[in-house]
Image: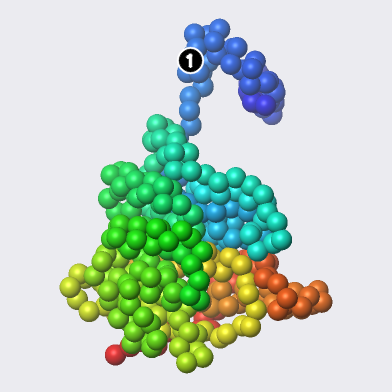
Amino acid sequence: MLKIPLIARFPPRPIRYLSVSVEVFLFITQRSGGSIKKCGMASPPILALVLPSDTGRVLSIQSHTVQGYVGNKSAVFPLQLLGYDVDPINSVQFSNHTGYPTFKGQVLNGDQLWDLIEGLEANKLLYYTHLLTGYIGSVSFLKTVLKVVEKLRSINPGLVFVCDPVMGDEGKLYVPQELVSVYREKVVSVASMLTPNQFEAELLTGFRIVSEQDGREACNILHTAGPSKVVITSINIDGNLLLIGSHQKEKGQPPAQFRILIPKIPVYFTGTGDLMTALLLGWSNKYPDNLDKAAELSVSSLQALLARTLNDYKRAGHDCESSSLEIRLIQSQDDIRNPKINYTAETYK
């Protein structure tokens, strides 16, 4: 229902609202010449554009689940807590994540994605400071995402494209093989920040990572291809789990590189990669010249959330190694907004 104010006459009274159906509103509009403005009403300004937040406006193209926290459900809320306006496009809409015995839902194709972009453009709503992408399941959709990058940068050349190249983990590919070459040959070159895991970094570089030095070299290869910021979010080296970050502040110059030692938790959580990339976007924008600081905040925030998730499942009497665990996102708002840094970066010399 639309609410049209009835302006009170003297003596002044509180404004009352008359509820009318959309059909009645359209009838009134048509009777007055078919123009809303002739009814004394005009489209309000888009405040996210007229009065933008100090942080930014993010278009996030990822998956969505009705229940649980993966994809956009894992990324949008944390970014909002950090002060960003976030507009999500759901590449898929499933009842739950695919780790359950069954799931149902719909998959967006490339043409449908472009329809949404054209709708935004028609209303001059396509100004974004950041584009965030996660899991993409088809070549056609990924190629449309590349069109989206080009379109957004034609409107804002300073657009920051943060790409989580979700392709697989621990040697297992869970997207079609042909996506790998599209990421390697086309996506990497236009990304501002890449957040692959160890396996994905190997796929993108064709370089085997078996040591910390290999991880650093993989970052160098990716810098040469395009992005100024690379974070390999998890590398398993000699039984240790590491994050390796690399920031090339000027083309042709050696990047500043660091590592963060991450504790291993012997259970599987869903949505952590999506959350980690969102946190890295949020904090790296607040500390644009200090990727190590942004990574410290992101890792510390994520680890606090995982500890809470694990404790809550144990408190409920669940065998945590018997299934994947849904993260406790809402219960961890303070750890997202104001994380205590418990994991610090070690700079490589």
Q: Amino acid at mark 1?
A: Ser
Residue at position x 70%, y 56% in the image? 102
In the image, taking residue 248 as reference, residue 312 lies left or right, namely right
Q: Which residue extends farthest right?
A: 317
Residue 6 visible in the snapshot:
no
Crowd band around label 1 with a 10 angstrom C-alpha radius: few (<14), some (14–19), many (20+): some
Image quadrant in which you'd find residue 65: bottom right
Up/down of 127 relative to 158, above or below: above
Query: Which residue position is annotated with label 1?
Result: 35
- Specify the quadrant of the image occupied by residue 187: bottom left
The location of residue 302, given as percent across then percent down, is 56, 73
Q: Front-most of 189 and 292?
A: 189
Residue pushed farthest front?
177
Seen from the viewer's position, the closer of residues 80 and 15 is: 80
Q: How many marks?
A: 1
Say which residue appears at 68% left-offset and 20% top-offset: 20
Outermost residue on the left side: it is 252
Quadrant of image for the N terminus: top right
Which quadrant: the C terminus?
A: bottom left
Residue 73 makes an appearance in the image: yes
Identity of the residue drawn at 39% across and 46% down: 144
Across and down, in percent, residue 121 comes to 39, 36
Instruction: Where is residue 291? Give x, y as percent.
Output: 37, 74
Left or right position of 130 against 250: right
